[in-house]
Amino acid sequence: MGHEIKTVGLIFTRKKIERSGFIGLEDYAIKRDIRIIHIDLSIPIEQQGRLDLIVHKMTDLVAKIERGDTEAKILFDRFTKYRQANPHVIIIDEWINIEKVLDRMLLYHHTQVCAKDTIDQQPLFYVPKSIALDSIKDWNDKIDIAFPVMCKRRTACSSTEAHQMTLIPSPKCMTQVGKYIKNDSVMLQEFIQHDGVIVKVYVADGRISASTRPSFKNLDHSGDVVHFDSQTLPKSFETNITLSDDLDKVFLVSDPSHIHKHKEALMDNNKLQKIADSLHRQLGLTFFGFDVLLQSKTNAYYVVDVNYFPSFKAVDNFHSMFVDILEKRLYIQK
């Protein structure tokens, strides 16, 4: 004790509250003189009490605005006007920084900047070559990209479409993609062979937590396209999730050879920390996650995605970590 009680408002959907590791946070935080409230954007924020700090994730609102939802725009504008009228309220994170990861091609350029950093005179990490198409119909065989490729929508907002992706083994399969993606802008990203193991890294104000998950097997140019929702993929190697037949062929569902243990032994936490620090400097985000692939044979580090405020549910001591960050902003950085 010793500090006056500060009030922190959260702007998250109920689903994200449950997924993000916030359950039980209010009880923990009040013991450290921080009152947590959940802001309702359907009513004026000024009517919900005095606030010292706001933590938010409104990417779902932006996704709705992009689809023409006028109600979502009213809610987002309410936050923006409150922000302008109350500059003393600390915001985590500033929208100008969040926007850097909401367009996958813009994010690609930001990660390319970070990839110029070095460690022991070698690149800190690599970024798979990516190209943008205004529509999948703009594809032609003269485009310089190596297959297989992963096709993702350019928008990375919290929408169902943003999580739907298509694995394309060869150029001749490009004609099959139109049935999954109509006229949306897309990004084609070269597929990095990585032995079916992906490294998920969670960053909270510079502190990292890393773990491995199942991913795609090493692929050749055979087979058909595989369309999937990245949010429904298995999150552990000890799972009973049944995959579709086409996904089951290319995804490392079980790992009897313990490849993920081998990859974990190769993981260099010092390097992952340096990557996190580089991304933080470039993006200016407090809470984010990034995906790393350790390339087959070379074990080169490839950063393939960055997300704003992923679920920290599996991160040990997240409540303590989160409140530490709030205290730092409230009492030290004011």
Image (cartoon, helix red, strand yellow):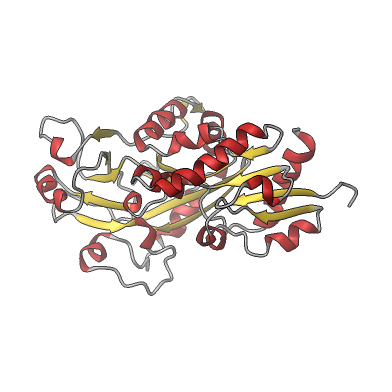
Q: Is residue 37 visible?
A: yes
Compared across the picture, whether 234 is left or right of 217 comes to right
Q: Residue at x 13, y 53 (%)?
A: 222
Picture coordinates of residue 253 (x, y %)? 34, 66
Residue 155: which quarter of the image? top left
Q: Residue furthest right?
A: 2
Compared across the picture, whether 216 is left or right of 262 comes to left
* Up-down relation of residue 242 to residue 4 (above or below): below
Image label count: 0
Q: Residue at x 48, y 44 (%)?
A: 74
Residue 190: which quarter of the image? top left
Q: Quadrant of the C terminus?
A: top right
Picture coordinates of residue 192 (x, y %)? 31, 44
* Up-down relation of residue 285 to residue 293 (above or below): above
Compared across the picture, whether 166 is left or right of 55 comes to left
Picture coordinates of residue 323 (x, y %)? 72, 50
Q: Residue at x 47, y 51 (%)?
A: 200
Q: Is residue 293 visible?
A: no
Q: Residue furthest bottom?
A: 240
Residue 227: which quarter of the image? bottom left
Picture coordinates of residue 109 (x, y %)? 39, 28
Q: Residue at x 33, y 46 (%)?
A: 67
Compared across the picture, whether 2 is left or right of 142 comes to right
Out of 81 and 31, give the one closest to the viewer: 81
